Image (cartoon, helix red, strand yellow):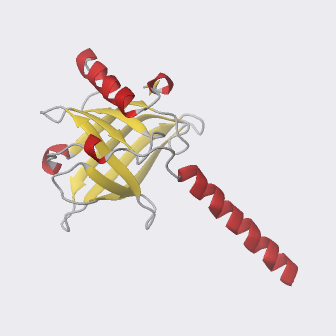
Amino acid sequence: MKKEKWMIGAAVGAGIAGVAYALWPKGKIPKSAIVQPFDKRKYMGMWYEIARLPNRIEKNLKNLTEEYSLNEDGSIRVITRAYNFEKNKPVEAEGKAKFKGPETRGKLEVAYYLPIYLDYNVLDIDEDYHYALVSGNSLDYLWFLSRENSIPDDIKTRFLAKAVSLGFNTGELEWM
């Protein structure tokens, strides 16, 4: 019985270590790259995913949207909806975002499964808050977001240039 418990403990420990390694940042986002000033009220509402770097979190998902709204405590409610084409069904997840530092800076963290928060950095945004370039804490996660199902060429070019300057491999982007 002792041997079985030890083996189970070792397996759980190895699993946790594997997940931690997979999520551990491979290259940091410089603080200077994060949007400031940032207006959280203008950011609220519906966003459509236009492009993303492939990642495990969104594997087999398409038509992804995120809807942001303010909670009474100042945090942000996040509703993510998508279609899982492998399972042939819609999926939805509710999360919570909060600022890491001042609310005038686009550095947040979001959790869908508390208490595990992941970084959410707004790297670029147009002045009308129609298009946003967002990343995680590393060069492994990058998204192009829009208030509609498309993005103008000038914004696409601007976001690509910014992403390349930060070290992202934009050749791997998946365009929705």
Is residue 80 left or right of 107 when viewed as pictured?
Answer: right
Q: Nearer the viewer, residue 102 or 128?
A: 102
Question: Outermost residue toward the top?
Answer: 153
At x 32%, y 52%, the residue is 78
Q: Nearer the viewer, residue 71 or 84?
A: 71
Residue at 46%, 62% (x, y): give it. Answer: 113
Q: Position of residue 133 (x, y in %)?
A: 30, 35
Q: Quadrant of the N terminus?
A: bottom right
Task: Examine the rendered structure and indicate whether residue 86 appears above or below residue 136.
Answer: above
In which quarter of the view is residue 59 placed? top right
Among the 4 quarters of the image, the one containing residue 99: bottom left
Q: Along the line of sight, which residue is nearer the eye, 22 or 29?
A: 29
Quarter holding the C terminus is: top left
The answer to whether any part of residue 149 appears in the image is no
Q: Give how far across and how far down residue 153 sits, in percent.
A: 27, 15
Residue 116 in sight: yes
Residue 163 in picture, x, y percent from top left? 36, 30
